[in-house]
Image: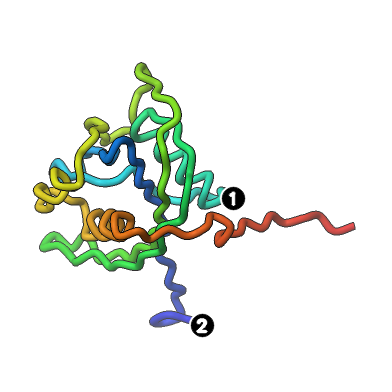
């Protein structure tokens, strides 16, 4: 029930979206820790937000694309390594979704830290593995390419109801 010395442990809950169009993947180049890295459109779940809504929001904010979620790819747990400066070591619980593009908002400003959204073939993405933000980037894509798809109905968002 409790973590070391009475503290409660809570992982960072994140969502990521694999957007595919004509065999290409919609990725983001972003600045993280002073480096240029590649990631899926991804980000943190916000309070009172469903996982599905978070995936749609993060994709729009980071790529300027509205998408339609088509499947749940999987849930992934990862602990970032501790860096020499003492940063890192955070635990992540990532929920990954497959999606198809619907509409691009060309003039929309992208989230802070996002350099650009870019379409890449799986081979291009794999060839730049040294730039992946985490091992989750390729693992999620590999699972998607391997055919891992689950119904979105697996995920339920229950909203409190008022009593009385």
The numbered disc on residue 1 is: 2
Q: Write the residue at 28% across / 54% down.
A: 141
Q: Viewer-proximal residue, 39 or 11?
A: 39
Residue at coordinates 42% horizontally, 80% vertically from top-left?
Answer: 3
Residue at the spot of label 1:
48
Dot placed on the residue nearer the N-terminal end, 1 or 2: 2
Of residues 62 and 120, the one nearer the viewer is 120
The residue depicted at 90 percent of the width and 57 percent of the height is 164
Judging depth in this view, the residue of 73 and 89 nearest the camera is 73
Instruction: Give the distance between the C-alpha atoms of the residues marked 1 and 2, in whole angstroms.
Output: 24 Å
The mark total stands at 2
Crowding around mark 1 (Cα neighbors within 10 Å: few <14, some 14 to 19, many 20+) is: few
Question: How are the residues colored?
Answer: rainbow
Is label 1 in contact with label 2 (beta carbons under 8 Å)? no
Residue 143, percent across and down?
31, 60
The mark found on residue 144 in the picture is none
Q: On the rendered structure, is 102 left or right of 147?
A: right
- When the figure is inspected, residue 116 is found, relative to residue 92, above or below; the finding is above
Name the residue nearer the viewer: 77 or 26.
Answer: 26
Residue occupying the point 24% across, 30% down: 116
User: Which mark lies nearer to you, 1 or 2?
Assistant: 1
Disc 1, SS? loop
x, y percentage for residue 138?
23, 56
Asked if residue 24 lies left or right of residue 8, the reply is left
Relative height, residue 123 to residue 4 (above, below): above
């Amino acid at each position: 029930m409790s973590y070391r010395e009475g503290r409660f442990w809570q992982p960072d809950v994140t969502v990521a979206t694999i957007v595919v169009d004509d065999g290409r993947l919609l990725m983001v180049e972003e600045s993280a820790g002073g480096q240029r890295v590649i990631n899926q459109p991804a980000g943190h779940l916000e309070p009172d937000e469903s996982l599905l809504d978070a995936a749609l929001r993060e994709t729009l904010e980071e790529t300027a694309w509205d998408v339609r979620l088509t499947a749940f790819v999987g849930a992934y747990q990862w602990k970032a390594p501790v860096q020499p400066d003492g940063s890192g070591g955070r635990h992540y619980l990532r929920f990954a979704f497959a999606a198809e593009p619907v509409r691009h908002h060309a003039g929309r400003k992208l989230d802070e830290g996002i350099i650009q959204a870019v379409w890449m073939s799986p081979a291009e993405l794999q060839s730049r593995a040294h730039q992946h933000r985490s091992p989750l980037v390729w693992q999620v894509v590999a699972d998607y390419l391997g055919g891992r798809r689950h119904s979105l109905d697996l995920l339920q968002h229950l909203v409190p109801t008022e009593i009385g």
